[in-house]
Amino acid sequence: MHATPPLTPTRAMKTALVFGASGQIGLPLLDRLGDAGWRVHALSRQARSDTPGRHWLQGDFARMPALPREVDALFSCGPLDLFARWYATATIASPRVIAFGSTSATSKHASDDEHERDLARRLLGAEAAVFQASEQRGASATMLRPTLVYGVGRDASLTRIAGMARRWGRFVLPRRADGLRQPVHVQDLADAAFAASLAAVTAGRSYELPGGETLAYREMVRRVLACLDPPLPLLELPMPLFRAALAAAQARGVARNLTPAAVARMREDLAFDAAPARRDFGYAPRGFRPESRMFDAPDRSD
């Protein structure tokens, strides 16, 4: 691969540095920035070829490559806690910082699961650290908290459900798994990040980013199964029978991530208000209309 010289943008052309650029939100964000005429420095763990307007940097937070001295906006689409630690001592100048966290920051703070409570603490702590560091250097930070992310087969929720259903020929849920959910497409999140970066009113604020439709957990899963090729059935069991079946599966090394807290949450409402994001930067997510290709896990080379 031939080396490409660093970008040399004109004065009128905006520049961005994107962390998590090769991830499920990062890639559509790169396209969104490119469509708007921005020059982008994109960080990836693997070497990638430059394209017009896009310069790839190889590295991560543990081995950061040489970065531009200043950009118009920093976007963090990867782990928020790692970005927060880096940003606390970073020397790059940027008036705008847009970082993705998760609605888990608030929805899991009172979980019965210690690991989920720790996740919520880390997310909230990272948000606070980014806000503090941005204020100290005279920059404006905005936090974005998506709900259940889907769209390119790289999420750990709906794509995992589709994968298990394909292996088993069906998917099993406990009865009354009717807690409300709002799955959100990665493209809508990329559009939101770009729009928020241009809206001065978003400075110093956190926004929940739910999808455009609120539906019961069981209905969300049913739609995923119905879009697969071939469509697969959803089976619903009484909770005691479901727990017994789950314990048997976990004894064989299957679905070990499905903790008792996660099972209980299937009956809990996790719905969030999109009105502030809609008001401040025109957030308009799509309804949940899944397609089979959205749950085809890509070849992970990064």
Image (cartoon, rainbow, N blue to C red):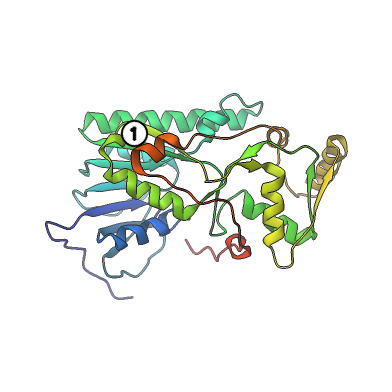
* Picture residue at 36% right of the left edge, 30% below the top: 129
Q: Is residue 126 visible?
A: yes
Type of amino acid at the residue the image marks with label 1: Val
Please state if 240 lies on the left or on the right of 294 as rendered. Answer: right
Q: Quadrant of residue 230?
A: bottom right
* Picture residue at 37% right of the left edge, 44% below the top: 282
The vertical placement of 160 against 79, above or below, is below
Please state if 191 lies on the left or on the right of 173 as rendered. Answer: left
Please state if 238 lies on the left or on the right of 27 as rendered. Answer: right
Residue 266 position in % (x across, y down): 70, 37
Please state if 201 lies on the left or on the right of 152 as rendered. Answer: left
Q: Quadrant of residue 207?
A: top left
Residue 74 position in % (x across, y down): 29, 46
Q: Which residue sits furthest bottom? A: 2
The vertical placement of 112 against 39, above or below, is above
Q: Which element is circle 1 on?
A: helix
The vertical placement of 77 against 115, above or below, is below
Which of the two residues, 24 or 55, is positioned nearer the viewer here? 24
Residue 295 position in % (x across, y down): 61, 60
Question: Dot 1 corresponds to which residue?
Answer: 130
Q: Quadrant of residue 275?
A: top left
Quadrant occupied by the N terminus: bottom left
Q: Which residue sits furthest top? A: 110
* Picture residue at 67% right of the left edge, 55% below the top: 224
